[in-house]
Image (cartoon, helix red, strand yellow):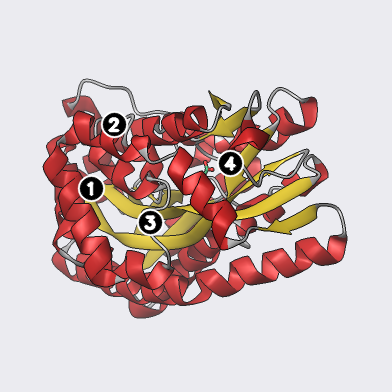
Amino acid sequence: MCAAPRNRLSRRRFAQALGLAVLPGAGAGAGAGAGADVARAAQRARVTIRLSHVVARQTPKGLALEHFRERVRVLSQGEIEVLIYPNSLLYGDEDEMQALQLGAVDMLAPSLSKFGPIGFPEFELFDLPFMFDATAQVHRTMQGAVGRELLDLLSRQRLLGLGYLDNGFKHMSANRPLLAPADFVGLRVRIQSSRVIAHQMRALGAKPVVLTFGETHRALAAGVVDGTENPVSNFWTQRMHQAQTDLSLTAHGYLGYAIVVHQQFWQYLEPADRAVVEQALAESLAWGNAIAQQENDEALAALRASGATRIHALDAVQRQRLRHATRGVHEALAARIGADWLRRMRGAAAAAA
Ligand code: LMR
């Protein structure tokens, strides 16, 4: 948190207590424009909160976080300022979690897939192919015991999960239609750093290549990878259509986010400030979840209108074949995190259907 002098000192002490140097913060790390933003906010507000993410503003996550910034400003009557660094401007996938641990950034909204590599493989339950059929079903699962327990796990690393946020269902892209398992054979496919997603790609005969989100467009354009998966809002706003001739609407997996802070940052907030942040977040996550589908629909309409990428719908039989080809991925995750997690997640998803 970049805050009033008392809080700013606290953040430095926090990093020192961990025996770590404070990473280049908002002012130093984000370029002159961002540095000026920080300086202006620090003058105006009693408390500033630095929030970093990797996607464009015009996405479900980008918009929900802008909404959060505005609600915090209104509810705190301008005393708390949220500084948002979108599009990997401040930190990318690889270093944002470390920055949060160091106190160099205060709040993140990583995809659920990005918690596996930092020691929470249980979050990969959300990556399982064909686990969910509809977003409402995902929401009910998240709001239930399994969703709450997953967020509680974050305390193992002194993190605090403040809620979930949607993007939507992922689809597959490449320079050819991907309608059957045979279409994937030999493709190098960019994935997030999730072992479940890697296994899913191998099960389809593709070669998974882990790259940060920020690198993906370039890697597709350069032919370093042949394809990728993401909801259409990310595909469109990262201009992946310029590098992919075909998008197949596989809806094979879900992409959502957890809002996360470090416990130490949370404790530094005054109780009244914490209440403002909680209220603003609850409102903004509900708002974001309500607009996510529409954002993805609009991105799909824009993509169609651009004529840049051929769009392929899959029928039920084609989806069933992909489901069948990837079914072993579920049991492999169960072997890593415990069969009980998978049983409970499946039970929650079935009850929420
Ligand atoms: C990705 O890396 O593909 C996504 O997690 C990006 C995001 O945050 O939506």
Q: Nearer the viewer, residue 343 or 11?
A: 343
Q: Secondary structure at mark 3?
A: strand
Q: Which mark is residue 278?
A: none
Whole-angstrom CA distance, mark 4 to mark 3, is 18 Å
Q: Residue at x 70, y 65 (%)?
A: 300
Q: Earlier in the sequence, mark 4 or mark 3?
A: 3
Q: Amino acid at mark 1?
A: Phe
Q: Nearer the viewer, residue 288 or 144?
A: 144
Tag in front: 4 or 1 = 4
Q: Earlier in the sequence, mark 3 or mark 2?
A: 3
Whole-angstrom CA distance, mark 3 to mark 2, is 43 Å
Question: What residue sits right under mark 3 in the picture?
Answer: 48
Question: What residue sits right under mark 2 in the picture?
Answer: 332
223 versus 279 height, above or below: above
Q: Quadrant of residue 97?
A: top left
Q: Position of residue 349 (x, y in %)?
A: 27, 62
Q: Are marks 4 and 3 in contact (CB under 8 Å)?
A: no
Whole-angstrom CA distance, mark 1 to mark 2, is 36 Å
Q: Position of residue 85 (x, y in %)?
A: 53, 49
Question: What residue sits right under mark 4 in the picture?
Answer: 89
Question: What residue sits right under mark 1 in the picture?
Answer: 265
56 versus 334 height, above or below: below
Q: Position of residue 223 (x, y in %)?
A: 76, 25
Q: Residue at x 43, y 76 (%)?
A: 287
